[in-house]
Image: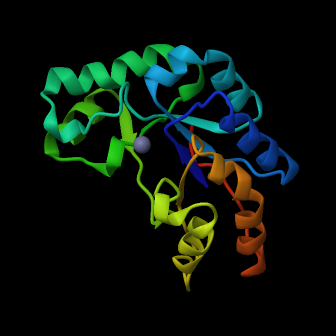
Amino acid sequence: MTFDDGPHPKHTDRVLKTLSDRQINATFFIIGENALAFPEIVYRIAAAGHRIGNHSYSHHDLTKLSAKEIESQIMKTEKLIALYLGKEKLLRPPYGAHNSLVEKVSKELGYQLYFWNVDTLDWKESHRPDGWVSHGLAQFNGRDNTIVLNHDIHESTADHLDLFISEILALGPTRFEIVAGG
Ligand SMILES: [Zn+2]
């Protein structure tokens, strides 16, 4: 389970509460601007045992930027969350957008790119309030290993995360893990 784009001043703590109640650890890909605004929430995410990764500074499509700009997007965020990144630093490029330059720069900065294979589209108006749950669940079909993309900045995600977890558990024996390494 992964959560992108936070931290958010209201909804991230609600997501943390649900994960804590369910004793699930997840990985949070943090936007630097939000880490700057809400450092105490980043601390709480890490203190709860979740993994933290880099999601750029201002959520630009990195494939549209120069090498210097890509580096700046990554490093400005790294300065804010360095304490929590661990030894194996993870980068999830915004929108999953990457090309050879993004790959080269992130590798030089010691990052591993990390994507997903289940996209709940919880950010989409048409998937609210809880349509994202079934949209995500349908993608589990027959898969043994899934990396699920959610966003902890949406009220509807916080509202229905517990339901989503219930539905996942109803599919069969499930182990929730944070991204390995770190
Ligand atoms: Zn994002």
Residue 151 picture location, percent across and down? 54, 47
Instruction: Tell me what residue is drawn at x 58 percent, y 45 percent.
Output: 154
Residue 111 picture location, percent across and down? 37, 35
Asked whether 84 or 80 is in front, the reply is 80
Q: Quadrant of ligand 1?
A: top left
Instruction: Tell me what residue is drawn at x 54 percent, y 28 percent.
Output: 85
Q: Is residue 75 above or below residue 27?
A: above
Report the residue that reaches farthest toward the right: 21
In which quadrant will I find the N terminus? bottom right
Q: Is residue 133 above or below residue 180?
A: below
Q: Is residue 67 left or right of residue 156?
A: left
Q: Is residue 51 left or right of residue 167?
A: left
Q: Is residue 18 left or right of residue 73?
A: right
Residue 145 picture location, percent across and down? 56, 70
In which quadrant will I find the C terminus? top right
Residue 136, by quadrant, is bottom right
Instruction: Tell me what residue is drawn at x 45 percent, y 66 percent.
Output: 117
Residue 167 picture location, percent across and down? 73, 74
Instruction: Tell me what residue is drawn at x 22 percent, y 31 percent.
Output: 105
